Image (cartoon, coloured by chain):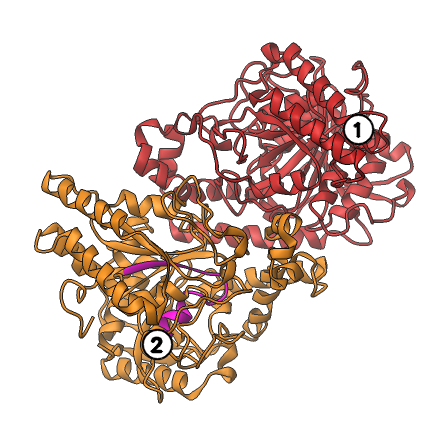
Chain colours: A red, B orange
Amino acid sequence: MSGLPLPLGLDAAGAARAIKDRTVTAEALTRACLDRIEERDGAVKAWSYVNPDAALRTARDRDRSLAAGQDLGLLHGVPIGVKDVIDTCDMPTASNSPIYAGYQPSIDAECIRVVRGQGAIILGKTDTVEFAAGGRRAATRNPHNVAHTPGGSSSGSGAAVADGQVPLAFGTQTAGSLIRPASYNGIYSLKPTHGTVAWPGARQYAPSLDTIGWYGRSVADLSIVAQAFRLRGVGAAPSVALSCLKVGLCRSPNWHLTQSASRAAFELAGERLASAGAHVITLDLPALFDSLPAAQDMIVHVEGMPHFLAEMIENSHRLHKDFRERVENAKGIDAGALVAVYDRAAEGRRVFDGLFGADLDVVLTPAALGEAPLGADPAGGWAMNVMWTLLHVPCVAVPVTTGPTGLPVGVQLVGPRFSEPRLIAIAEQVASEIDQTI
Amino acid sequence: MSGLPLPLGLDAAGAARAIKDRTVTAEALTRACLDRIEERDGAVKAWSYVNPDAALRTARDRDRSLAAGQDLGLLHGVPIGVKDVIDTCDMPTASNSPIYAGYQPSIDAECIRVVRGQGAIILGKTDTVEFAAGGRRAATRNPHNVAHTPGGSSSGSGAAVADGQVPLAFGTQTAGSLIRPASYNGIYSLKPTHGTVAWPGARQYAPSLDTIGWYGRSVADLSIVAQAFRLRGVGAAPSVALSCLKVGLCRSPNWHLTQSASRAAFELAGERLASAGAHVITLDLPALFDSLPAAQDMIVHVEGMPHFLAEMIENSHRLHKDFRERVENAKGIDAGALVAVYDRAAEGRRVFDGLFGADLDVVLTPAALGEAPLGADPAGGWAMNVMWTLLHVPCVAVPVTTGPTGLPVGVQLVGPRFSEPRLIAIAEQVASEIDQTI
């Protein structure tokens, strides 16, 4: 990251390499992260829990095992932040809910076990919107301008990575909780294909949409974590020449809600790719897709019914009305409407994937409505994300430029389901042209 | 249950009523269950963990609170068994895996919280196929003839309810793990619409299929638990007259695998309904459905990849090869084939639900291939269940008769997604005609 001294200036992929090469120790990197957190957390408020001593102890362990010839894997010695809806066996998981203040899980979430197994250091827990769903907002501020939101619900994870406090962080997306904060904070994110990263141990909310993903400061960062999760051949796909690439610029159904900053970033990205020799076309989606944002909204509410029922029975007085309303089906959604919406979503998945082939390699579409708003993240800020979440497709957020307020604005690249290897290979090339924020 | 003295002879709905009426105490019922377990567990082996003192303590608590005018709800004082892949905060959850022997979760699964909130008493944990998925079999025997299997993977739950050791028990179904054991054991089961009962805290394996359900000894038993989970209006649907009912007899794609016992039970059920005045028709499914059993098999394997990855990294030497092979994609399933199968399943859901209306109220179809086999449950025993699981539709298992070996054989009733209120109302009427096992 520009402006930060080494080792904080390294992205996660660079840090992982430097640790393996023994040019940087895991301890030095972890200490630099902790120092940065100490310096900045009063302003940015990205963390809900950090245990510096435990993190340093693990870092020294990682250094010792590497010295003994034991390389645990792709993330050996690399610190990672964890959205505080994901269980950790050695740190509380509060989900920003008064019900879970201080709650200590007995076991790590599946995704934590995977990255620990690959040598990562869990640096701490990052602040989140309550249950990653509604209710209470995170306290986190945008590190580029603390008067602005970092976006949500993965607020702390996005801000911490952007601010150089940690090279990687986990987030989750059910509406737009990974990709929107990436755009607001000027960083990279992968929301993988739904279901490819195991959810258990993270706070479930709408299972047909809930997706675990991560933040980094380069496409290479996204790739090493994807490789740790063994996403079908990531890292083994051939690299892609821009001159052979067919990029579909897709305004997507909620374009009318976008602000000029997002429109400008979207058009600028298209122009840069065209200048670099890519074949850039306009992709208009069939009318079916116009109804998908509302479909996501219905599904998210209905799937909340069973998932907040136990809280409602045990803790209704401490449960925010956002969640009580879901349990009570306050929107009065009936079975017929719900089934129609599930079926329409499935049809959208089939049709969208069918667009790819000889005429289309990747979709480029806005990542957020505009720059990060002043103050709190407004409801509906996820308008550019909900359809893609519903379609189950992988999305990569890429920074592009800054808007009139000087805050970052990105775009997202979207591929068909289970296409992570190729999408990441494409994103490597595309990012080198369109990301001029560095 | 015939042959058992009161209070064990009561079904769960009857027991719940008797406890509220103060004609039976929760303590007396719990003690009767524990006595029955002590008498029978050496032969049936349904339980992996029971703590009699804790269960009796809870039962006395329930009696005291009722005496003080505090009725916790629909299941006040009713004991329930829990398949040992579902987390309980006061009992270990071993999933029949050497990795989790003695593992004590810090919190109850969502479904446990719901039934405890409605006053149920968690009697203990029931034996299961390893991770409810493969690997090690349960030790449980069929209570009707201990030389035979009770079916799996919800082996202990099915056997314990059938044997009068507990009036209710939770199971899970990803292939045929609820409905098949119900048929083998001669009891009732509801596999609800996928997603209507919150999964978190149960061992996840294939999230787009995994479904929590339960066993009881009557449709009324299934109904009170469904009401506890607030399944959209269960208990409020109008009762159904058999003379107005259009029943579709559906052999379903794997009919060629069924044995004479299942064919006879299926035909007998149809004849009894026709005699009772129902309009019984033959339902032939479109050709699309012939490929759905294989689709379920592919999905179950692919979704196992992420869900056993953490075990593979941490515990590969203690992980059965069934699970290692999933992580390694031993079947070599590629993304294109997988996406095609997801899309075909979605199309099947839409088409199946579309069959219901003026000409069809409910589908009646075999629940298992035949009687419970001798010895272990064979692979593929779930052939009559996998398509319905994939379709996400609610299924109710109903006993019908006994086969040549004297073991129970049932059928299942199937409705469109989210139709539990009507399906249960229909099952009440249908069961009173076709279940002549009592």
Which part of the image, by quadrant, shows the N terminus of chain B? Answer: bottom left
> Label 2: chain?
B
Residue type at tag 2: Gly
Which residue position is annotated with label 2? Answer: B410
* Residue A110 part of the magenta segment: no
On the image, the x and y values in percent for residue B258 come to: 47, 83
Seen from the viewer's position, the closer of residues B266 and B328 is B328
Image disc number at residue A15: 1
- In the figure, residue A27 lies in which quadrant? top right
A206 on left or right of A275: left
On the image, the x and y values in percent for residue A118 come to: 71, 40
Dots 2 and 1 on the same chain: no
Please report the residue visible at 53 percent of the width from the left and 45 percent of the height from the top.
A200
On the image, the x and y values in percent for residue A400 come to: 77, 26
B226 on left or right of A31: left
> Label 1: chain?
A
Foreground label between 2 and 1: 1
- Per the rendered image, the range of residues in magenta is B168-184
